[in-house]
Image (cartoon, helix red, strand yellow):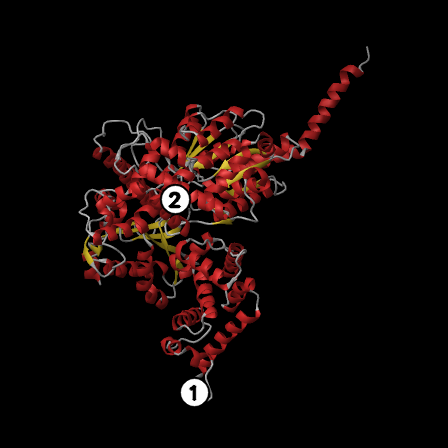
Amino acid sequence: MSDFKFTAPVIKELLDSELSERSPIVSLQDKILAIRNSLRPGQQQMADWQSGPLAISAVPGAGKSTGMAAAAAIAIARQYERSSSRRHLVVVTFTRSAAANIKAKIRKDLKKLSLPQTGFFVYTLHGLALNIANRHSDLSGLQLENVTLITPTQSHRFIRNAVEQWIVNNPERYLRLLEGHQFDGEETERLRRQSVLRTEVLPELANTVIHEAKSSGISPELLREWSKQTTDEYAILSVAAGLYEQYQNLMRSRDFIDYDDMILAALRVLENDSARRIEQNQVFAVFEDEAQDSSPLQTQLLEILASDAGDNSSLLKDAMNRVSTADSCTDAIHRVSPKLNLVRVGDPNQAINSTFTPADPIYFRQFCEECDRIERLATMDQAGRSTRIIIEAANFALKWINSQWLAATNNKQQTPDNRQVPFRLQTIRPVEAGDPQTNANPVPIGRGLELYTPRDIHHTVELLSQRVIELFGEDPTQNSAAILVRENRQGRWLGEALASVCKEHKIILYDVGERDRRSHVPQEILALLQFCDRPHSPDYLKAALEALVQRQLIPTQDLNALASLPEEFLYPGPLAAPQPETVQRAARLCRSLLRARLELPLYQLISFLALTLNYDQAELATADKLAERVNQQIAGNSSMGGMLSALSEIVSSERFEPVETEDSEERYTRRGQLTIITMHKAKGLDWDYVFLPFLHENLIPGRFWVPPQSQFLGDFTLSEVARAQIRATLHEESTIPDVSQAWEVAKNLKTSEEYRLLYVAMTRAKLLLWMSAAQKAPFTWSKPDNLQEQAPCPVFPALKRQFPEYVVNLAAMTKQA
């Protein structure tokens, strides 16, 4: 027998071994391992994902986006290794800025792996849905060139028109609402109630229920079915179903869509077997960030995409049945398939959108529970962002709130489940020694936690100003700081109060609420167009001049004097007194606007005005978006009147989203800057120093109250009762609660969310958390000078008792001063 038969395999083995040592695949494995080993334990569990479902419950500051980016890059690398197909990873997050941030991180990690920066797409949920719907427009029913996207508010004309049409079609139901609990038939009172119902109660009910039901895949017909299970005297769900139906009819007749229509359109595409296979064959997995903020329909969309093309018929059937029947949307969570290539990362304790969107944290909590049952749950509980005392304060607040909640519901002895308490019982832990994060759990500045009880809000500003000056010191460019407020009105008042101090000490004051009101673009464009349309109107001339002064295009001057005689200002006659240079500059600019109105085509006017107003890059992009929207809307009636009508509608009743050309996170967290920002908008951000003033019970957790004008209907609001009844059905409650029960549920939902909002605010701080509750504060910040005794947020006194050494002695401070 030839020796060749024995030696050839040995030689081949040695050759393979030698080649494998030089193989780029081995090198890639080493690089993957290097990235994996640079992560914390919870992040490593995400990086180790190979297939199937995985839930990651992460605490604030745990590095969710860093871990997800690394895990995504590693998953893409493994896909390169085991398959030559061009399937990609879909990464989904909540906001455009978050999408841009995670995309940059994934590219950076792919570069470390020496791989092409491809193989993945990052979307917002609505961006993903629109992408699918647009690729299959024949199935989705969305012809994007013909439809207009809106974000309707309670005052939107479609909501108002839906209310009016419902009243016409349902006179008996409307009269029942008009009668309320009691009514003596007095004509003045009848007219007052009619106004309240038409302009406040019914628009609010329509707006709430449309968002709540549509985002959960509930049709008007299904709402009517649910209404039969209730016994309230007003048949609130039936009224809501009628309003919802009218709104849908109006939207369809005018070719308008809202953001929920995008999700529904994508799901219509995925009902088709062929289209579904096409979409699924392009995706090897779906990673979702901020999963606690997803609605039921959004979750279903991701589940279908994350399923294997040949193995999801039952999953799809279940999902689509839930869209069109009375089955609970949470059924998807109870039947998590082991073949679902879906990684969901979130923190149910940071769910702060559930009282104005259907994104109830219960869905992600249940997904975590189901994944835990099949041993597919990872916990990221180590956080390096904050100093240890801040972590201790946040952990204490969470546990204290939960314990008080259970005590109040006489349930203290029971083990809480995910529906009984505001927070998931998850403790933040400091990182371990040798953690890869630089300066993890940093040394605190001062005490790290400072608790103040000022005399009033003016004293609050004094103390806050003094601390800001101390912290920024001689070189303010070294630190970042933010004041987190519950309402924009508080931010506006603080901005005015702090402006002079910040200017004196060369500290940049950035009021996000003021700067982000890029509704100034539609407003300013409307002011100039109204002037161009009616230049002889004193009101329109003054509004245009105010816009030009605001943009510093003309000098500040007495605008009332100019606007009182428009013709003399614009076209002074030979006998008129000579105009000062400042007036001449204003008149020349106004005349150039009028000339442009005559010489330019209508569709170019908005862009011209944007250039005239000297807009920056972001404002110009927003103006272009506005022009496209308006020109599309008036395509069948291209006239100045149509343009003014469309613009007026946008300004008065719609949230017009600006175009962002700069990373918002960078703008909000710049060093050398004191940022004033709402607690909601601060989510996902952090600063060296965080100030939480005005922590009062009337705002956190706040109180549910019925406006006096609508109390004739009872001691509840129709919109919140409807929301609670819908949620009870979605959450698989055995019965739909009656009005009084639903009102209590609604109160609990709001209280829970307000406490989670405070928790989010506290965990934004790295080196110092400054908290205060003044003894006197306004009952409402629309009247900040009307001070009265205000009780602190219940957590605040508890923090003072738990951490007495961090309570600042104001009397001692006064003596030192």
Is 282 in front, or is 693? 282
> Whole-percent x and y of residue 176?
26, 41
Q: Is residue 59 above or below residue 781?
A: above
Residue pointed to by mark 2: 441
> Whole-percent x and y of residue 502?
35, 64
507 left or right, relative to 308: left
Q: Is residue 630 above or below residue 264?
A: below
Which part of the image, by quadrant, shows the C terminus? Answer: bottom left
Mark 2 or 1 closer to N-term? 2
**Any part of residue 806 in sight:** yes
**Any part of residue 35 in sight:** no
> Whole-percent x and y of residue 484?
34, 52
Q: Is residue 660 above or below residue 359?
A: below
> How would you rate the neighbour count of disc 1 (Cα within 10 Å): few for under 14, some for 14-19, many for 20 or more?
few
Look at 55% across and 39% down and name the residue there: 140
Callout 1, which amino acid? Ala
Look at 25% across and 53% down and name the residue there: 191
Look at discs 2 and 1 and give the one toward the viewer: 1
Residue pointed to by mark 1: 576
> Whole-percent x and y of residue 131?
56, 42
Task: State which quadrant residue 774 falls in.
Answer: bottom left
804 left or right, relative to 312: left
Task: State which quadrant residue 334 falls in.
Answer: top left
Is 222 in front, or is 546? 222
Callout 2, which amino acid? Asn
Q: Are the two marked residues, 2 and 1, in contact with CB atoms closer than 8 angstroms?
A: no
Is 337 in front, or is 296? 296
* Dot label at residue 642: none
Which part of the image, by quadrant, shows the N terminus? Answer: top right
Task: State which quadrant residue 56 falls in.
Answer: top left
